[in-house]
Amino acid sequence: MKTQGLQMASACAIALTLTACGGGGSDSHVNSTPPPVPPPPSGSASVVIFPNPTPQTYTSVGASAAGTFFDTGSLGSVSSSDADQPHIRYTTAGYYEIQLPGKDWDGLIPHKGYLPPSENVFQPASSNNYFVIEQAKDKGYLYSELASWSDDAQRYGTVAFGSSTLPGQVPQTGSATYQGIVGGSSDVVNSNSFDGNYRVSVAGSVDLNFNFGQGTLAGAITLILDDYSPDTIGTFAFKDTVFSVGSASYSGKFDTSATGQNYFLGQFTGPNAEETIGAWALPFIFTTGSSTLTPDGKAHQAFGAWIAKKGP
């Protein structure tokens, strides 16, 4: 079975019944009115994302598309608009909450389809939508996380979120290299007897080389089609980068011969720009296949997000 991102079994329904009772002698009065029930907590204490969270709304950057992983038609436009990405916050009560595009804030809880509860597959308390985190804290990240998600409005994508760095906290001298994790989706379609038709997920790595004193950025992204047998997409250097001295954000494009949506944008996370999060869209020519995917030599679209941390 191929379990990738949001391609998972339906959630189990769990019903809880609350009862109240009272009693007394034959001459006593029984008060049958139950005491007020306090509201449930906004989220679940068993949802753990960051190692040392403090109350805040995290900054989100991501890329998403209309439809689902199981659509096989045209992908359509990929959006990096903030309104089309989920947002996460940590409350003073000690719980995480999620806001899907166009929705109100909701508690974030372990997905009900997993018993025992999963440590990285979550859902909003009022729906069965998936929110699957990378568990970046286990890879040494303190301020950034990567997640795939879907919502009731038939939209899905990958989002990076974290504690944003203020402009005055970005170094203005020296240089640094950030290396990180890439996740995302593509419009390449595959099928099998278990999953049916599905759009193949994307994984990979990213390297970002900042010269803080000169305000320059170089780097590259390496992608694979993350199927049963991974297929190499390629390594694509950054071009047309935009970064200035003291800036907490950056942007650019990729060096590719394919035509399609081509961009990346990101910002630093952590009190001293120790990490960074980014969103991206990249067109590519599918030329390298494997035992599970046959290349068609045509242009395809990939999109997603990344997290990266400063090297030594």
Image (cartoon, rainbow, N blue to C red):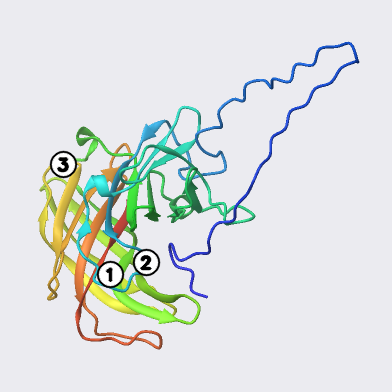
Residue 266 point in image, percent of width and height: 22, 50
Front tag of 2 and 1: 2
Q: Please give the residue where the numbered disc 1 appears in the rendered image.
A: 222
Q: Please give the residue where the numbered disc 2 appears in the rendered image.
A: 69
Res 33 → quadrant: top right
* Distance (Cα) linking label 3 and label 2: 35 Å
Front residue (pair 103, 246): 103
Front tag of 3 and 2: 2
Q: Which mark is residue 247?
A: 3
At mark 2, the secondary structure is loop
At mark 1, the secondary structure is strand
**Which amino acid is tagged 1?**
Thr
Residue placed farthest to the right in the image? 26
At mark 3, the secondary structure is loop
* Distance (Cα) linking label 2 and label 1: 22 Å
Sequence-first tag of 1 and 3: 1
- The answer to the question of whether label 2 and label 1 lie on touching residues, with beta carbons closer than 8 A, is no
Sequence-first tag of 3 and 2: 2
How packed is label 2: few (under 14 Cα within 10 Å), some, or many (20 or more)? many
Sequence-first tag of 2 and 1: 2
Residue at x 64% of width, y 54% of height:
116
How packed is label 1: few (under 14 Cα within 10 Å), some, or many (20 or more)? some
**Which amino acid is tagged 3?**
Ser
